[in-house]
Amino acid sequence: MTSLRVPNRQGHFGPFGGAFVPETVMGALTELERAYATARRDVRFRRELDTLLRRYAGRPTPLYFAKRLSRALGRVRVYLKREDLLHTGAHKINNSLGQALLAVRMGKQRLIAETGAGQHGVATATVAALFGLACEVFMGEEDMRRQALNVVRMRLLGARVTPVRSGTKTLKDACSEAIRHWVTTVRTSHYCIGSVVGPHPYPLLVREFQSVIGREARRQLLDTEGRLPDLLVACVGGGSNAIGLFHPFAGDRRVEMIGVEAGGTSLRPGHHAATLVAGRPGVLHGTRSLLLQDRWGQVLSTASIAAGLDYPGVGPEHAYYQLTKRARYACVSDAQAVRGAQLLARTEGIIPALEPAHAIAYLERLAPTLKRGALIILGLSGRGDKDVETIAQRVYGTNSRHV
C-alpha cells in the first residue's frame, strides 16, 4: 500500500489533489500555505486555537455510548462522537475558528464562504462576528429554501447571504460563485472553504483543523474501553467530518473506515451524490479528485435530501483512501436516511442532521454482518434542527406546524 503520509509538498494525495486555479489566485494560495506553515509551529497560535475550541466552541465533545441504539442494531457496540453538541450545532466550527485566526494573521478584513446545509455558513458568520470581520456567504437558492433557518441565523450574525441562481442552485454552484468572487477580492478577503476540497493547501488545512475529532475520539475510547475501535463510520459529502475522524486512525490498519455518501433516489445520473461510489477522476473547484461527470467530462447534477451531501465531487484524500483501500465507501438512499434519523431519535433521544443520518442508516444495514461485540465509533457531525421541516414533509406529508 502507498504511504499514508500525504499530501506531498505540491498538495498531491497520490494522483489526486494539487491546485488547478487561475494565476490570480495562486498568490493567495501561496500566502495561505506560508501563513499556515508558520502558524502550526507557533505555540501562541496553537494555544489560542485550543482555548477557543474549549471555551467558545465547547470541546472536547463527548464520546457517548449509545446503549439502546446498540441493542436495536444487535451484535455491535456503538459510540457516537457528539459534534452536534458544539456551538453552532456541527463540526464546522472547528475549521472556521482555525481559518479565521489565519485570516487575522494575514491581515484580511473579510471572510468569504460557500455553504449547502448552512452549517458552514453559520460557523463562518459566527467567527466573523467574533473577530470583527465582514462576512459574505454564497448559498444556492434551492438550499436557501430548504435550509431557511440557517439563512436567518447567518443574517442575524451579521453576514450577507448571497443567493446563487445558476445551475442546480445548490452547493456546487455556490462554490463556483464564491471562487469567482474571491478572484476579484483576494487582497482583502480570505476564502474560508468548509470541506476538504478545493486547491492545495485547503484539503490539508481543513483536515488538520478537523482532526481534533479523531484525536479526541481515540483518547476517549482508549480511556473507556482500553482499546481502539474495530470500525469508524461517517457521512461523506466533501468529506471534512469523515477525514477529521478517520485521519488520526489512518495508520492503525486494524481499524476499518467506512464513508457513507448520498444515494438520493437512485444511482441513475442526476439522482444521487455518491461520488466515491460512481465517480471518475477529474478536476473540480481547483483540485483533482473523483467527480460525477458524463462521458464528455461535463459535471453532472446531483440530488440528495441532505443539502450538505449534495456535491458532485469529494475531497482528494478520500479518493486516495479508496484507491489505496485504506477506507471503503457506500451510499444509502434518501428514504433510508430518514429512517436512520428516526432510529436514533427514538432509541437515544437525539435528532441527528440528515447528513449523519446516512451513516446511521448504513450501520443498520451493516451491523448484522459484523462480528459480535464489534466496537464502532460513528461520527455524529451535526444536529437535526435544520432538517425538521424536510423530515416532517417526508414522514407526515406536511410541515412541522401541522404535524
Image: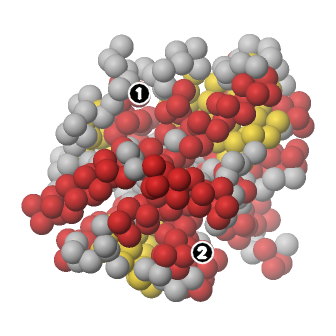
Q: Position of residue 185 (x, y in %)?
A: 23, 77
Residue 396 in percent (x, y) is at 79, 65
Q: Which residue is mark 1?
A: 322
The structure residue drawn at horizontal position 30% and vertical position 67%, both measured from the top left corner, is 106
Q: Amino acid at mark 2?
A: Asn
Considering only vertical position in the picture, is 15 above or below 135? above
Residue at the image position 20 percent from the left and 39 percent from the top: 10
**Would you say 237 lies left or right of 339 here?**
left
Q: Quadrant of the C terminus?
A: bottom right
Mark 1: which secondary structure?
Answer: helix
Can residue 351 be seen here? yes
Q: Residue 135, located in which quarter of the rendered image?
A: bottom left
Give the residue at x 32% y 17%.
2
Secondary structure of the residue carrying tag 2 is helix
What percent of the width, then of the height, locates residue 401?
81, 79
Q: Which residue is mark 2?
A: 150
Which class describes the residues within 10 Å of circle 2: few (<14), some (14-19), or many (20+)?
A: many
Percent position (x, y) of residue 15? 23, 31
Amino acid type, mark 1: Gln
Q: How far is disc 2 from disc 1 in space, using C-alphas?
A: 33 Å
Question: Foreground: 354 or 45?
Answer: 45
What is the residue that sits farthest to the left in this orientation?
23
Q: Earlier in the sequence, mark 2 or mark 1?
A: 2
Q: Is residue 361 visible?
A: no
Circle 1 residues within 10 Å: few <14, some 14–19, many ≥20? some
Image quarter in which the N terminus is found:
top left
Q: In the drawing, does residue 9 fall left or right of residue 126?
A: left
